[in-house]
């Protein structure tokens, strides 16, 4: 019996409670342009909304392998399982509420094929709403003045700017983070950091995926329960103590300050002023001197209803 063909690309799609968006995601993967040998691994983590029933309509496609958990196992266990099953030379992990542009593979695969030093390729995203309508067409990746190909470890430790649905990476690069630890509050940035410690990254300056913004996004829940902040600073500290990637004290303070500032903004916008005040204070102590941060830190000492009333008066 001949050995099964090893696919060039594995698409891994973890699914949990995204039935309204799932068809759009699956279609965007199945209808990729280019003659690439692919496999698609879909794992439904016991979705209460019966997302798995929709996936079953796609199982006639021999490229698609569908697994359905009888009981919810959580994101970490599901991701570990999916990556361990993936056989492709390159792997794309896409959330089941996002979607790829049809030329995603044509824009990313050639870079990995010709650049042996590059472990991960990513690109720009458009933002879409819950209905699939584009709300921001392009230029949604604030990557600063990074070169199109190069070492991005310091940059991504300073700001989590790589859009998960645009990523295609080498299998061996993904495996640097597998199995992922159970304490993670979110996974994609952790995996990018692990890869950036050993590989160069490449950027495609075009929109190659659509990121859906809606009330159920994981980012919102990570702010409310503070798991995002806990994960971010634990990962940063681990990298600081990595003997193979040393940063000066000034660089470390810069990275800490910017992350505290960003979390301060997120908490401020969520009305979590005590947490915002704490993060802004840490940002200021680590060197941030920007007026918006200082002003918001001061404002966070006042009652929120007072701030709202003043803001409304100024607008009027």
Image: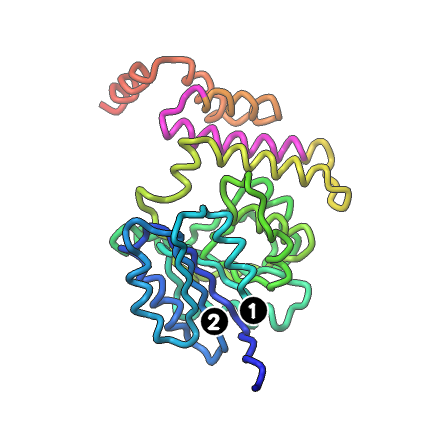
136 vs 173, left or right, is left
The residue depicted at 31 percent of the width and 45 percent of the height is: 214
169 vs 139, left or right, is right
Q: Secondary structure at mark 1?
A: loop
**Residue to which mark 1 is pinned:** 87
Q: Which residues are magenta?
A: 252-274
Most foreground residue, 288 or 261: 261
Placement of 237 over or under 19, stated as above or below: above
Q: Is residue 311 magenta?
A: no
State if disc 2 and disc 1 touch (CB < 8 Å): yes
Q: Secondary structure at mark 2?
A: strand
Residue 137 placed where, x, y %?
Answer: 35, 55
Residue 18 placed where, x, y %?
Answer: 32, 52
Q: CA distance from mark 1 to mark 2?
A: 8 Å
59 vs 77, left or right, is left
Q: Earlier in the sequence, mark 1 or mark 2?
A: 2
254 vs 123, left or right, is right
**Residue to which mark 2 is pinned:** 39
Most foreground residue, 96 or 130: 96
- Pick the quarter of the image with the N terminus: bottom right
The residue depicted at 74 percent of the width and 35 percent of the height is: 248
- Report the predominant secondary structure element of the magenta stretch: helix
The residue depicted at 42 percent of the width and 41 percent of the height is: 219
Residue 192 placed where, x, y %?
Answer: 58, 51
Residue 219 seen in this snapshot? yes
């Amino acid at each position: 019996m001949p050995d099964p063909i090893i696919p060039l690309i594995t698409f891994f799609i973890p699914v949990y409670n995204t039935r309204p968006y799932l068809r759009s995601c699956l279609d965007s993967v199945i209808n990729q342009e280019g003659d690439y040998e692919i496999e698609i691994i879909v794992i439904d983590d016991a979705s209460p909304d019966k997302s798995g029933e929709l996936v079953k309509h796609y199982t006639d496609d021999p490229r698609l392998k569908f697994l359905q958990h009888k009981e919810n196992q959580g994101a970490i266990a599901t991701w570990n399982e999916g990556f361990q099953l993936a056989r492709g030379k390159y792997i794309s992990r896409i959330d089941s509420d996002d979607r790829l542009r049809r030329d995603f593979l044509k824009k990313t695969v050639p870079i990995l094929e010709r650049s042996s030093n590059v472990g991960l390729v990513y690109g720009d995203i458009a933002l879409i709403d819950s209905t699939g309508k584009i709300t921001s067409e392009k230029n949604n990746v604030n990557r600063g003045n990074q070169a199109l190909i190069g070492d991005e470890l310091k940059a991504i430790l300073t700001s989590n700017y790589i859009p998960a649905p645009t990523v295609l990476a080498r299998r061996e690069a993904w495996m640097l983070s597998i199995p992922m630890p159970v304490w993670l509050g979110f996974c994609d940035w952790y995996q990018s950091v692990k890869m950036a410690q050993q590989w160069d990254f490449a950027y495609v300056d075009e929109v190659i995926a659509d990121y859906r913004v809606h009330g159920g996004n994981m980012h919102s829940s990570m702010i409310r329960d503070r798991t995002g902040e806990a994960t971010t600073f634990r990962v940063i500290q681990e990298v600081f103590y990595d003997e193979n990637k040393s940063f000066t004290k000034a660089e470390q303070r810069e990275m800490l300050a910017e992350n505290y500032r960003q979390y301060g903004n997120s908490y401020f916008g969520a009305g979590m002023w005590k947490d915002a005040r704490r993060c802004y204070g840490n940002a200021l102590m680590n060197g941030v001197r920007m007026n918006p941060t200082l002003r918001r830190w001061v404002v966070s000492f006042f009652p929120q209803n007072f701030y709202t009333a003043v803001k409304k008066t100024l607008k009027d």
